[in-house]
Amino acid sequence: MAEQAGGEAGREGLFAALKNSVATLISIGKTRAELLVTELEEEKLRLMSLWSKAIGAAFMLAVGVVLAIFCLALAFWEHRVLLFGTFAVLFIGGALFLIASLKRQTAQPSKMFRASLSELEADMALLRRNRNKPE
């Protein structure tokens, strides 16, 4: 009878340890999911800010450049064809440069979720160390 009670206590201890391990894994997963959601929200806000500033700056720059070209055309009315042609070439060259820059930038890997991935890798390393640790 004493052996039977001891065996049941051992099973209960094993079951409790298993429950604790599962609870710990769920807690780790929850923490990592919260970190992931936080990173997504921060990235969304950053991108919205960048886009709004970029669109505003592009609009203001475009209006300013058009006005400057018209002022130059009025100042040098006799050479207006040459002036407009020169600026057309400059704008097309700038556009091609920006397109090449965009292609290079999109070819680079994104840095999104780096913190989450590094934390998950650290968790996996810790779990491997604990699994291989002699008891």
Image (cartoon, rainbow, N blue to C red):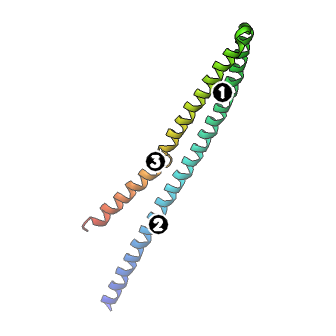
Q: Residues within 10 Å of mark 1 (few under 14, many from 20)?
A: few
Q: Position of residue 70 (x, y in %)?
A: 73, 15
Residue beneath the point at 42% across and 56% down: 120
The residue carrying mark 3 is: 115
> Which of the pair 75/134 is nearer the observer?
75
Q: Name above or below for residue 119 compared with residue 54.
A: below
Viewer-nearest of labels 1 and 3? Answer: 1
The earlier-in-sequence mark between 3 and 2 is 2
Which of marks 3 and 1 precedes in the sequence? 1
Q: Is residue 1 left or right of residue 71?
A: left
The dot on residue 23 is 2
Identify the residue at horizontal 66%, vertical 27% (top origin): 57
From the viewer's perspective, is 89 left or right of 113? right
Q: Closer to the camera, 2 or 77?
A: 77
SS type, badge 2: helix
Check the image and name the residue furthest to the bottom.
Answer: 1
Q: Seen in the image, is 33 located left or right of residue 79? A: left
Image height check: is 67 above or below 122? Answer: above
Amino acid bearing label 3:
Ala
The percent position of residue 65, horizontal first and vertical second, equals 68, 20
Residue position marked by numbered label 1 in the rendering: 57
State the separation of the CA atoms marked 1 and 2: 51 Å
Quadrant the N terminus occupies: bottom left
Q: Nearer the viewer, mark 3 or mark 2?
A: 3
| Residue 125 drawn above or below residue 134 | above
Instruction: Please name the amino acid that badge 2 sits on.
Output: Ala
Pointer 1 or 2: first along the chain: 2
Q: Is residue 89 above or below residue 118?
A: above
- In front of the other: 121 or 24: 121
Q: Say what secondary structure mark 1 lies in.
A: helix
Q: Are marks 1 and 2 in contact (CB under 8 Å)?
A: no
